[in-house]
Amino acid sequence: MLPLTRTIKGVSVAPGRVVAVVKHMPSPVAEPTEHAGMPPGTTVESEGERIRAAAASVQGQLRLRADTTDGDAKEVLLATARMATDPLLLKSAVARLSPANPGGARSAERAVWEAGAEVAETLQALGGYMAERAADVLDVRARIVAGLQGLAAPGIPTCEVPFILVAHDLAPADTATLDPAKILALITSGGGPQSHTAILARALGLPAVVAAPGVESIPEGTVVYVDGAEGTVCTNPDGELLQAAEHWTTKANSRPAFGGNNTLADGLPVPLLANVGHGADAGAAARAGAEGVGLLRTEFCFLDRDTEPSFDEQVTAYGAVFAAFPGRKVVVRTLDAGADKPLPFLSNIEEPNPALGVRGYRTDATTPGVLERQLRAIAAAAAAHSSDVQVMAPMISTAEEARRFASLCASAGLRTPGVMVEVPSAALTASAVLQEVAFASLGTNDLTQYAMAADRQLGPLATLNDPWQPAVLQLIQLAADGAAQASAMTGAPKPVGVCGEAAADPALAVVLVGLGAASLSMSARALAAVGAVLSTVTLVQAQRIAMEALAAPSAAAARKAARNRLPVLAELGL
């Protein structure tokens, strides 16, 4: 008798259908003995030096791994390397070595363990970006403890044949070095649609399902079928599922590269742009055919620094992106940081609710000058290149804020100001907001988080953090309708683009265009699939599909309604 098929439902992260055996992440580093004091013959000083040496070794190992990669993976590894020698972590660990510490002296291993737990708990309580960094701390803690114990650092398992990786969630440093030639898909019981695992799976083109309770109970070596588009994992797949996986592989391997000039079936241009963080990202996006940059995340210049980057540093960083797209549109998002992405020179980390605190554009009210200096640096970089540079502010909530940002841009010599629509109030009052600026871009990640009151980092809330949610689709339509009203009132076009992860979903891309999106921005890897699907529909067809999705009672029903109207998805293995 053939073994029974078991189906586990999770959250779709990256499309694709594959069949392979599963391998589990190795067991985590064991917690050191709770009451173990310093070994005989050692001192606080000698054990403290051992901690610092182990931390420096971990940092060196991560930097070596960073040298072998680029893009998002390199940034993740370097950020984790910096965390390995974080003064707060090391100082807290060394303090625990002393017999005067409450509870007595700890061993070096136990001291690092407790200090890591304390720092991670503090970051988790802050929420947002800092909650995400808690995973970095726990990963670093495990690596330092392993080094102190003379054990190998935790990492991705090895296997002679390609496999599907199963984990509760993946540490950022491990996710950053996944080898798509060996790992065919990712399935996790934890995480969410905006976790490191999800973001890098999309960047690597790996089918992935997260927040799938029960996957860790699948025995190692079991053959499973993963459908990243549907968010399902099936053990012991039957012939039909095996055929579906084979069909997807064939179609994925034969899918043509993006041609760099996207139009709908009726000839209507809908530019496909790229989300980038720095010059290396921009170069890769240009080679992939991106028609420009829809989102330049400038915070990469600012994060993990104690001081504001200099004017020249900023000009160089922005110029590297502009140079990759001569004569093309590059939309620069001003610093999206604050209490959820704390910066020593900008933020107050004591806020009780960082996601609703001083972040993005709002930091200019509490720390004036940083935004104006950034705008001047953007203008200087733009003047040295031929790109069509446009600038938008994150976390705009009112028309008054939009008006002031436009004034700041004008003072810096930037002619095309815009706003991010990620706060529901901006979508609801889009007509008034868009009368003050030239364009808007929908940040679907935050718009979904705020519309659904669900932290996008929390796995248990992953189903709420779905851009297919009817409330989110209605806000998107309101923003597009408001832009049309502003255009009619001012006599100037007010285009609305999308730069959130939603644009990388080929089915949702059709809906977004049908709702009024004039351009879509995504990771470079998603360009070909999205372009292939959009080229098969007219604007009228996209609008009809969007209306069906809007009328659906749930996110799942909206997704199903759209996919049922797009048979090309099955033909392309999407």
Image (cartoon, rainbow, N blue to C red):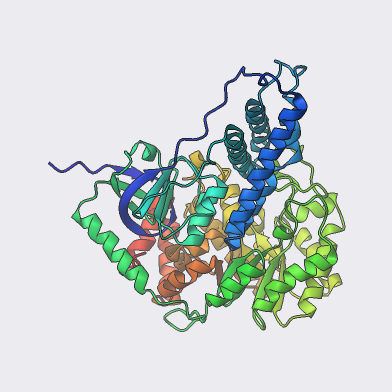
Residue at horizontal 61 percent and vertical 73 percent from the top: 283
Frontmost residue, 50 versus 515: 50
Q: Give the percent coordinates (x, y) of residue 7.
A: 29, 44
Residue at horizontal 65 percent and vertical 73 percent from the top: 494
Which quadrant of the figure has residue 206?
Answer: bottom left
Q: How many marks?
A: 0
Residue at horizontal 78 percent and vertical 17 percent from the top: 100
Q: Give the percent coordinates (x, y) of residue 101.
A: 75, 19
In the figure, 20 relative to 166: above or below? Answer: below
Residue farthest along the front direction in this orientation: 41
Which quadrant of the figure has residue 266?
Answer: bottom left
In the figure, 199 relative to 285: above or below? Answer: above
Q: Give the percent coordinates (x, y) of residue 172.
A: 56, 48
Quadrant the C terminus occupies? bottom left
Frontmost residue, 294 versus 71: 71
Q: Give the percent coordinates (x, y) of residue 229.
A: 38, 57
Q: Is residue 23 left or right of residue 205?
A: left
Q: Is residue 414 visible?
A: no
Residue farthest along the left direction in this orientation: 1
In the figure, 174 relative to 409: above or below? Answer: above
Frontmost residue, 219 versus 357: 219
Quadrant the N terminus occupies? top left
Q: Is residue 508 visible?
A: yes
Q: In this view, does 307 lie to the left or right of 123?
A: right
